Image (cartoon, rainbow, N blue to C red):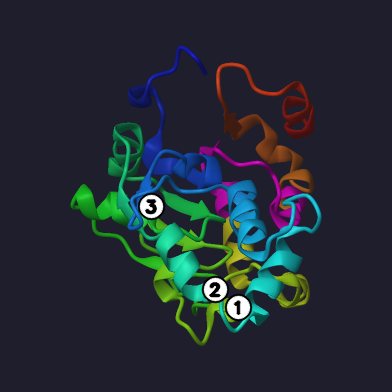
Amino acid sequence: MSTTTLSQIDVGGSVLFLGSGFSQGAINIAKKKLVTGRGLKTEFAQLLGVHPDTYDLKTLADEVASRANLNLYQLLYNLFTVKELQRHQTEILRLQWMRIYTTNYDDAAEYGQYKNHVRAPSYSYDDVKPRKLARNSIIHLHGVIRKTTENNVLQQLILNESSYVRQHFEKSVWYDEFDRDLRFCSACFFLGYSLSDYHITALLMQNPQVRAKTYFVTSDSPAPIFANRVEP
């Protein structure tokens, strides 16, 4: 893919899948760079006064939510509400994709489309799926900060232990839509995605026919272990 230009890609027939790595470098309303999953874990650990590797992210999220002196919603709102994107992020979101899927909580995709004067609907995993999806629609498979409130933060975002259990037993219709789009798209590009969601991994593994049109966009020197993981 190193010699391929955007003009050679069937953007209108391609699915774009954004992981937290895509949002790196974007600036939030707290005037800081957006964090990845590991960065969020570190933020929680610092608030709780523990080492980041002592507990997993789900456990730390539950603990932050339980502390009366901490405001989980406000913390996440400040971390994941985007104020500024890098040029390459804006350029990618200027394009008219078949569909945009993401496991990110942040609103980078919506902000990028807004800055580019692109009009497209945005959905979260708990929204009712319309009969027909518009091109370039954004689907947040783990929830989105724009729909989150003080009262629904642990229901809207797939973040803590109970939300991951709920996701496992109550599979969203949007995963079925992603599966369908994988089968009918000309290509699917994963940007900054680590395969941390086993629902997504399972869909890719059980559909070997999509292997030839699935691309993981990485740094120039991806970690060998990650390269081995995505190879199947």
In the image, is 148 to the left or to the right of 46? left
Residue plotted at (49% across, 66% down):
76
- Which mark sits nearer the N-terminus, 2 or 1? 2
Mark in front: 2 vs 3: 2
How packed mark 1 is, by other alpha carbons closer than 10 Å (few <14, some 14-19, many 20 or more), is: many
Number of callouts: 3
Q: Residue at x 70, y 24 (%)?
A: 223
Mark 2 vs mark 1: in front: 2
For the residue marked with disc 3, what is the amino acid? Answer: Ala
User: Residue 145, position in %: x, y?
Assistant: 45, 68
- Label 2: few (<14), some or many (≥20) within 10 Å? many
The amino acid type, in three-letter code, at marker 1 is: Leu
Q: Which secondary structure lies at badge 3?
A: helix
The residue that disc 1 covers is: 154
> What residue did someone put label 3 on?
108
State the separation of the CA atoms marked 2 and 3: 20 Å
Tell which of 22 and 153 is nearer to you.
153
When the figure is inspected, residue 232 is found, relative to residue 8, above or below; the finding is below
Let me know if residue 120 appears in the view. yes
Front-most of residues 19 and 15: 19
Crowding at dot 3, Cα within 10 Å, few <14 / some 14-19 / many 20+, comes out as many
Residue 219 shown in magenta: no
Q: Is the residue under label 1 in contact with that under label 2 (CB below 8 Å)?
A: yes
Instruction: Return the residue at label 2.
Output: 72
Is label 1 in a helix, a strand or a loop? helix
